[in-house]
Image: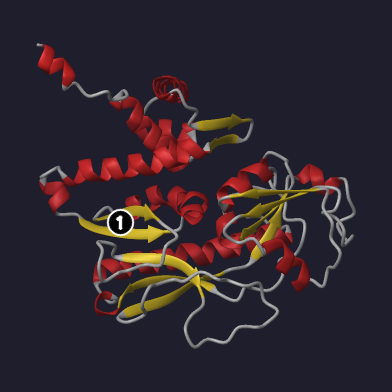
């Protein structure tokens, strides 16, 4: 009996983990409840139970919804990997008949754009299981299990305007055998809560000066280059705060902490009631988002279905932000 006790696993409630994965995927207790056929209150209780077990906070709750804490986001990615391993261990006929496609995508793009769309993809294409892994590292499609990837960068041989905001990311370690398809432009777009805009004249070039500018550690020149592209000089905000990812800067802006600058592709799920676009976007950056695959498999029917769907969703996202910016119904 003593030996058995020593081998007992210290696991959190498994039902709470399932609820957490659904809530993290939707970033909504209500949508998680709809998926799992339970009440939002039941989801909230399961999250409280899991947080008490972990002694860590997973979500920040606010009037406009929920947002990951830094710990919560890291734990969510681990749970996605764990659930994927569990699914792979199921030798059911339904799973064996399903085509599995693994997509590697950057963290903020996954959280702000792709994850909310996955249920829509599953409904439209039940024969394909789209698995998401996240990374910002250059992709090595030849030596890992990833089928396709989304990356931001400069296409070899393409010329970009010198005054365009820079993109310094490497998309792949080697372009040998890589097929790249354009997904979306990288257009940096300032956002803030509507209250901040109502306090200022929107035509003033120093609109951001009394307020905090929210920066992204991975792209530290975003604000500086955006101001330069609009010929705005000597901008001196009251405060600067740096975040590790666009999605954390986005949440800070949604809480009213200041002005964030976010790629348009990541803004298609916002409403004008929670975030405003105070300026017209400037020029596209010197780089774009691409879907990358192995050249030998680029025309595989299953991969083609996923790639074409991603391109369609990206086009709709950019169009939605354009309508948002112009004041048209989204």
Secondary structure state at the residue bearing disc 1 = loop
Which of the 4 image quarters holds residue 196?
A: top right
Q: Which of 184 and 51 is in front in this view?
A: 51
Q: In which quarter of the image is residue 274?
A: top right
Locate the C terminus and report the quarter of the image it occupies.
bottom right
Question: What x and y, as percent, mark residue 171?
Answer: 44, 71
In the image, taking residue 145 as reference, residue 209 lies left or right, namely right
Placement of the N terminus among the 4 image quadrants:
top left
Q: Mark 1 highlights which residue?
A: 125
Of 121 and 20, nearer the camera is 20
Instruction: Estimate the x, y position of residue 166 in percent, counting from the top left.
Output: 62, 72
251 up-or-down from 62: above or below:
below
**Colour scheme:** secondary structure
Q: In this view, does 194 lie above or below 99?
A: above
Residue 50, quarter of picture: top left
Viewer-proximal residue among 38 and 208: 208
Q: Which x, y percent locates residue 289?
A: 50, 69
Left or right: 161, with 213 as reference point: left
How many labels sit on residues?
1
Residue lying at 77% horizontally and 61% vertically, measured from the top left: 279
Give how far across and how far down residue 6 sits, in percent.
17, 19
Residue 108 vertical position relative to residue 90 in the rendered view, above or below = below
Can you name the residue that lies furthest to the top here? 1
Mark 1 surroundings: few (<14), some (14-19) or many (≥20) residues within 10 A: some
Residue at 31%, 23% in the rendered image: 13
Residue at the (68%, 61%) spot, across then down: 189
């Amino acid at each position: 009996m003593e030996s058995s006790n020593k081998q007992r696993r210290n696991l959190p409630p498994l039902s709470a983990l399932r609820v957490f994965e659904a809530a993290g995927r939707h970033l909504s207790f209500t949508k998680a409840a709809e998926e799992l056929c339970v009440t939002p209150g039941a989801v909230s209780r399961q999250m409280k139970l899991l947080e008490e077990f972990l002694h860590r906070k997973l979500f920040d709750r606010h009037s406009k919804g929920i947002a990951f804490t830094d710990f919560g986001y890291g734990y969510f990615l681990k749970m996605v990997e764990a659930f994927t391993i569990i699914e792979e261990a199921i030798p059911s006929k339904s799973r064996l008949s399903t085509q599995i496609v693994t997509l590697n995508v950057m963290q903020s793009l996954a959280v702000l754009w792709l994850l909310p769309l996955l249920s829509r993809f599953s409904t439209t294409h039940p024969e394909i299981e789209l698995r998401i892994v996240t990374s910002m590292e250059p992709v090595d499609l030849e030596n890992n299990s990833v089928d396709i990837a989304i990356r931001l960068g400069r296409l070899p041989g393409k010329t970009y305007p010198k005054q365009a905001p820079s993109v310094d990311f490497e998309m792949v370690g080697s372009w040998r055998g890589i097929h790249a398809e354009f997904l979306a432009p990288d257009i940096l777009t300032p956002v803030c809560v509507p209250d901040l805009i109502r306090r200022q004249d929107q035509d003033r070039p120093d609109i951001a000066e009394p307020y905090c500018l929210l920066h992204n550690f991975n792209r530290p020149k975003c604000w500086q280059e955006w101001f330069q592209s609009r010929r705005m000089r000597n901008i001196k905000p009251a405060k600067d705060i740096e975040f590790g990812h666009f999605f954390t800067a986005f949440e800070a802006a949604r809480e009213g902490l200041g002005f964030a600058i976010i790629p348009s592709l990541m803004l298609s799920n916002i409403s004008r009631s929670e975030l405003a676009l105070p300026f017209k976007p400037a020029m596209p950056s010197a780089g774009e988002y691409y879907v990358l695959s192995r050249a030998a498999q680029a025309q595989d029917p299953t991969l083609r279905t996923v790639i074409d769907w991603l391109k369609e969703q990206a086009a709709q996202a950019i169009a939605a932000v354009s309508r948002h910016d112009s004041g048209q119904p989204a």
